[in-house]
Image (cartoon, rainbow, N blue to C red):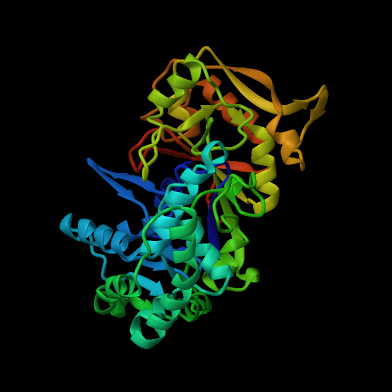
Amino acid sequence: MPAVVIVGAQWGDEGKGKATDLLAGRIDYVVKFNGGNNAGHTVVIGDKKYALHLLPSGILTEGVTPVIANGVVVDLEVLFAELEALTARGVDVSKLMVSANAHVITHYHRTLDRVAERFLGKRQIGTTGRGIGPTYADKINRVGIRIQDLFDENILRQKVEGALDMKNHLLVKVYNRRAITVDEVVDDLLSYAERLRPMVADTALELDRALAGGKTVLFEGGQATMLDVDHGTYPFVTSSNATAGGAATGAGIGPGRIERVIGIVKAYTTRVGAGPFPTELHDEQGEWLRSHGFEFGTTTGRPRRTGWYDAPIARYSARINGVTDYVMTKLDVLTGLEKIPVCVAYEVDGKRFDEVPVSQSDFHHAKPVYEELPGWDEDLTDAREFTDLPKTAQDYVLAVEEMSGARISAIGVGAERDAVVVRHDLLS
């Protein structure tokens, strides 16, 4: 079976864990290929809720090998805290593999992230302050610390010394913070080395062998298309490639391996952090969506910005990612609305744009052009077949599908793991 990629098709928090669960029992590996603990998955199994921040959601599925690949930045404190929490709840985490080439988030990365964001004032990006961006910056500047460096203290010390030479000048002279010592960073990182060692592997080689052996490998993207550092609403983006192409570089597989790309969209739209958001609601309807959808960040707890479904963004994501199937989540949240607006285009200075404008300035000033679709009052949570949905809910899905550039193959109708309507097989 070829590789399958799952990506968020909006600004994140679409419910990618729901799609991973849909494939449970049919996949052998689940691979996180980008990001760090700046995003989260909430997975509900029966009466148990699991909030994952760094670990791939496949770690909750028995028999699946979870992999943290080279494209991820790893906060070791968070990693072991999550593993311990899952172990305490009876989850087997012994199969986890971590790439030797993944970069490590250190104390100075977190510190720089927080003070730099405060320093920006009104120009803040809206980062989570968890050191993600500074770690990726060090990776590109070739002064990063990799997982494998923890097993050679001399190399580790040299790399930390080199990184802190410049960073301490910045902390002390620009941000008026204390200097960070080499010893405190090295000692902290070395404290994880022996616990980490059994998990570390050449994950690219492992995944190549798995694919060659007919295994099914699922690549799970963090964040989402509109937060991709190249294709998102730059500079209000994450620091990695969250699109399907990022799976190839972020996990070390050939792009020709990828044949299925599953995009995740909410039945409406949300965003966390600063940046343009054409359909954002600043009124009681926005608050209604936030409260009914419980739109608060899994990782940060921050209230999410809310708005109506944006079809041009869905078409953009379908094109950028090569989406073969969409999974729509949280259709049930819209229950009770008499009319449901859907953004079908934008207007900028009197000109209509049917697609996402290439100019960031135009997108920032874009006003949504809406079509209204009839709503419904019936509870959707027990629906398991498309025909179980009210006719107006079916019509909503079909209308949005026509606008979105790919078929909608599954629909989330509740928080529970099995609260899904499946229209098409995601793997064929």
Q: Position of residue 379 (x, y in %)?
A: 39, 22
Considering depth in this image, is 389 or 33 the residue closer to the camera?
33
Tell me if 266 is positioned left or right of 298 in this view.
right
Q: Position of residue 367 (x, y in %)?
A: 70, 24
Q: Is residue 157 above or below residue 271?
A: below
Number of numbered discs visible in the structure rendering: 0
**Residue furthest out toward the top:** 338
At 35% across and 79% down in the image, what residue appears? 150
Q: Is residue 96 visible?
A: yes
Q: Which quadrant would residue 355 be assigned to in this image? A: top right
Tell me if 214 is positioned left or right of 244 in this view.
left
Q: Position of residue 128 (x, y in %)?
A: 43, 47
Q: Is residue 321 above or below residue 13?
A: below
Q: Is residue 33 visible?
A: no
Tell me if 267 is positioned left or right of 232 in this view.
left
Tell me if 398 is positioned left or right of 390 in this view.
right
Considering depth in this image, is 113 or 11 the residue closer to the camera?
113
